[in-house]
Image (cartoon, rainbow, N blue to C red):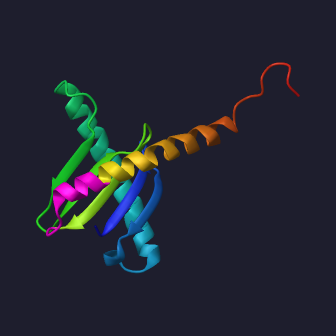
Amino acid sequence: MHSAVIVSVDGLLLYWTGLEHAGPVTKREEVAEHRAAIVSGMATLADEAARQDRAGAALRTLIEGEDGWLVLGRAGANSYLALSANKGADVGALGYQLSLLAGQLGGQLDAARRLSASRYQAPEEGSP
């Protein structure tokens, strides 16, 4: 694996690592933001295609490029995790690792989203 990004369902970049091939850190951040938009769009398209085929929501999407792989999947209810690797990678192991990571991160990402949203709820009637 040479890079990973975690994005919200609406395309907001939450985390990235790797992307050393993109150059200096500022350039890598730009590439990560671009990758987040791509991953969000791909996941949305995969979900819609799966639903139209009556397969439910897409769990994983695999793209095979000439020189590598991109595997993305859900990480909780509101996020996606995408891993990229070179062509020589074991794509079965990559998918397995994505499933493990998504399972470990999904609950934490969903909980963090609930906690940040709860800070902005209007106070209940009668409370100070």
Which range is magenta?
87-97
- 128 horizontally vs 50: left or right: right
What secondary structure do most residues of the magenta stretch adopt?
A: helix
Instruction: Report if residue 96 lies within the magenta region.
Output: yes
The residue most toward the right is 128
The residue most toward the left is 66
Residue closest to the eye, 30 or 112: 112
Q: Which residue is drawn at the image coordinates 14% and 61% (left, top)?
A: 65
Q: Can you give x and y, in whole percent of width and height, for residue 96 in the image?
A: 25, 52
For residue 41, what is the image quadrant?
A: top left
Q: Is residue 115 above or below residue 93?
A: above
Q: Can you give x and y, in whole percent of width and height, for residue 42 in the image?
A: 27, 46
Q: Which residue is drawn at the image coordinates 17% and 58% (left, top)?
A: 91
Q: Can you give x and y, in whole percent of width and height, for residue 63 in the image?
A: 18, 54
Residue closest to the eye, 94 or 52: 94
Residue closest to the eye, 48 or 56: 56
Q: Classify the position of the C terminus by image quarter.
A: top right
Q: Classify the position of the N terminus by image quarter.
A: bottom left
